[in-house]
Every structure is written in C-alpha cells, then in structure tokens.
Image (cartoon, rainbow, N blue to C red):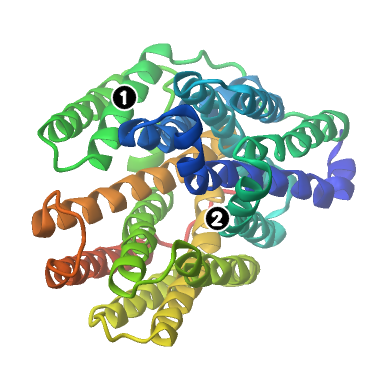
Amino acid sequence: MDHEEIAKRKNFILSLMMISSFVAPFLGASVNIALPSMSKELGMNAITMSWMAMSFLLSSAVLLVPLGKLADIIGRVKIFIIGNLIVVAGSILCALSKDSTTLIIFRILQGIGSAMMFGTNMAIITAVFPPNQRGKAIGINVTAVYLGLSVAPVLGGILTQTFGWRSIFYVTIPFGLFVAIAAALVIKTDWKEAKSEAFDYLGSIIYIVSMSAFMYGFSKMPDPLAIGLVIFGVIGLLTFYRVEVKTPFPVFNMQLFFGNRLFAMSNLAALINYATTFAVTFVLSLYLQYVKGLSPRDAGFMLIAQPMMMALVASFSGKLSDKYRPGMLSSMGMGVIAVGLVLLLPLNGDTSNAYLIACLVLLGIGFGLFSSPNTNAVMSSVEKKYLGVASATVATMRMTGQMVSMGIATLVLHIFIGSDKISKVNEPAFLHSVTITFAIFIVLSLIGIWASLARGRGQKL
C-alpha cells in the first residue's frame, strides 16, 4: 500500500485503533465492578480478588517495551493483529473459566494481548498521519482510552447485574475480531524499520523480571516483602541499564533517554502526571462512601465527572498540539491539575458534592489538556525505527505511574489508620491522610510542570 492509499484510509485505520484503545482499558477496569459476583461464584478470597485485577495490569505493563521493540523488528501491524486475537482468545477462555486459578491465568493472557495492542497503535497512528494532523489523531485515540475507563464501571455493572460477570468478556469478542480482520484486509503495508536488528532476549528478561518486582512491590507498600521487591526491582533496572548500553541492538536504546531531551522529559512528565492523578479516584471513592455515606453506585456516578471531562478535552488539546508547542499545552494541563489538587486540600465531612464535582471537572480538564499534547511530543521526537518502542514507553509510563500513585496513597493510609477499617472512630485520621496524600500529589505535579517545561522544542519527524 503506497502513501496515497494509506492517506485515503487513514481515518478508517484510526477508527480501528480507537476500538482497540477502548476495549483494552474497558477489560482492565470493568472487572473491578464484577469482583463481588466473581468471588461469590468462584469462592475467591481478598488476595485472589486483588490478583484478578493485578494480573492483567502487570502482564500488560511489563511486556510493553519488549513487545514494542519486537513490533519494530517484525512489523507493527502484525503484532497489533496478533494482540487483538490474543485478547479475543483470552476473553473466550475467561468467560468459560470454572475456577479462580484458570481465570487469573487467562487474565494474564489478556494482558499480553493488550500490551501488543497498546505497544503498537500509537506507532501506527504516527506512521499513518502526517505531522500537521498527528496531534488531532492522537487526541482522538486518547479520548477512546478515557471513554473505555469512563464507561467500564457503569457498563460493567449493568452487564454483571443483567447477564452475569462472564458477559463482560463475551461482549468484547466481536470488537476484537472485527479489528483484527479489518486491519488484515485494509492495512496492506507494515512498518518494520528495525527489521535488520536482532531481538535482545537477555535485556528483555532482565527488564520483565525487574519491572514485575518493582510494580508489584510498590502496589503492596508498606509490607516488608513489598519493600524488598521494590529494592530488588530498582537493582534489576540498574542492571538492565548496564546491559543495554553494551548491547548492539538493545530492547530499549538508552540514547532515547540520555541523548533525546524531548523524549526523556516528556516521558518523565507522563510518569509524574499519572503518579499524581491516578489514585485521586481511589481516595475520593473511599471518602464518598465512608465519610459522605454514598452508595457505590452513587459514588461511581460522581467520580465519572473526571474521566468524562478528560475524554472531552483530550481530543481538543490533541488538535491544538498540531499548531502550538505541546510542552506549553502540557505544562498548562499540569498547572490546572495542581490547582484542582489544592482545592481538594480542605476536604472534610461538610464539603458539598457540588464543590467536589467542580474539583473533579477541573482535574479532568487538566489531565485532558496534558495527555494528548504530551503523547504527540513523545511520538514526534524519535526516528521511525523507534516508533514501536516509543509507543510502548508512553504506555509503560502510564501504568508505572498508576502503580506508584496507588502505592503512595496506600502507604499514607497505612501510616495513619494502619490495617483498621475506616469508621467514624478513625474518620479524622482518614481525612488527615487524604490531605497528606493530596499534598504529596501537589508537590509531584509541580515537579511535573518543571519536567514539562524543561523538555525543549525539538522534534525528529
């Protein structure tokens, strides 16, 4: 397929990327609402339930970079199609699972497929759209991600209540099949600019083991074993760096970070941004249910304000980043997030729901203003042969930041209320932990603003 043919079909190709960008986060988030039903049928305890969500996130996050590099070597469209088919197979097997162990195994399979999708779809969009249209396309695709996250709790709850938890998996199967078949029929060209390079197996293994230890450990802080896993993960990642700088064809070219300021600072800004914002919903969910006394459904409907606003703004900000400096727009977004977090500091039992929704809307605007331009900056800062790795790195920063964010919130909660359940007795301590958590996030957001402003202007493509 020549460039003219690709240009004619670029909007259809974008629609395929959007469907996959909706399905993957939907599968990740909708299961959370179905956990009580799963637990009742399959007899799961609290640890098993946590692994139901963790297995998908971990397998997806730690494989993104290796699979992104593999896509640069053997073809991004090929990996994208295989990823969709793996997610479809995983969904079928999850829906047919008879016990929690097999369900967790098949959730890992779904995570692998999701990593193949997320590690390639931004790279495909970047290859298909010219620089002056790229930001708009990326913004639209990012919007699909947020829509998946926004719809997941509501649609997941309706499906679980009406048809049972297995329907969450069944409903995604037609979409995955359609995307895989359509991509195979429509996208006749593949992009494999690194096809002459050998795949770095040693570096990939060290990276996967180290990232698994770090991310899982951080999510379970402050347990002593978790601290040990985090330390092991950091040592492993330092070892990974030493191995990669000596490897002729590394799974991750360290020059992308140490020789490309725009790429490095944009990814750092993304990591900090997700570390700053992801756990806000978790903290406010506890606040709304335990302090304000709302039902899970009512709390969920309130919290939707943030991701819905993200989805609305992300498409618009992506288009703006085609005309204005992505760094300026991203920095503005981080600034808006910081203001929203400051407004959440005085949260107490008398805070009105209207005030809280206004804060969530502000956070959503900030996040939407940040994300699309920042992703555009990352994808436009590298040579074509690194697009798969760049796409995977953006997604890795997102998931690592989410884990770090949850780790911070969990650690602060543990310090102030320990392992006790939240109640009226320890409500003041809980509210104090909320304030401390938001204060930490404010400091992080200020660092994120610096990283966003420090990235420079240059673009490679």
Q: Earlier in the sequence, mark 1 or mark 2?
A: 2
Amino acid found under the numbered disc labelled 1: Val
- Residue shown at 44% from the left, 33% from the top: 52
Residue 247 visible to an observer of this rendering: no
Q: Nearer the viewer, residue 272 or 22?
A: 22
Which numbered disc covers residue 405? none
What is the secondary structure assignment of the residue under circle 1? loop
Q: Nearer the viewer, residue 233 or 198?
A: 233
- Residue shown at 48% from the left, 71% from the top: 364
Can you give x and y, in whole percent of width and height, for residue 442 in the image? Answer: 25, 70
| Of the two numbered discs 1 and 2 in the rendering, the one whose residue sits closer to the viewer | 2
Q: Are marks 1 and 2 in contact (CB under 8 Å)?
A: no
- Point out the image quarter for the N terminus: top right
- Residue shown at 24% from the left, 40% from the top: 218
Which numbered disc covers residue 245? 1
Residue 58 sits in quarter:
top left
Amino acid found under the numbered disc labelled 2: Pro
How many residues crowd around disc 2 within 10 Å: few (fewer than 14), some, or many (20 or more)?
A: many
* Relative side of 4 to 249, left or right: right
The residue pinned by badge 2 equals: 153
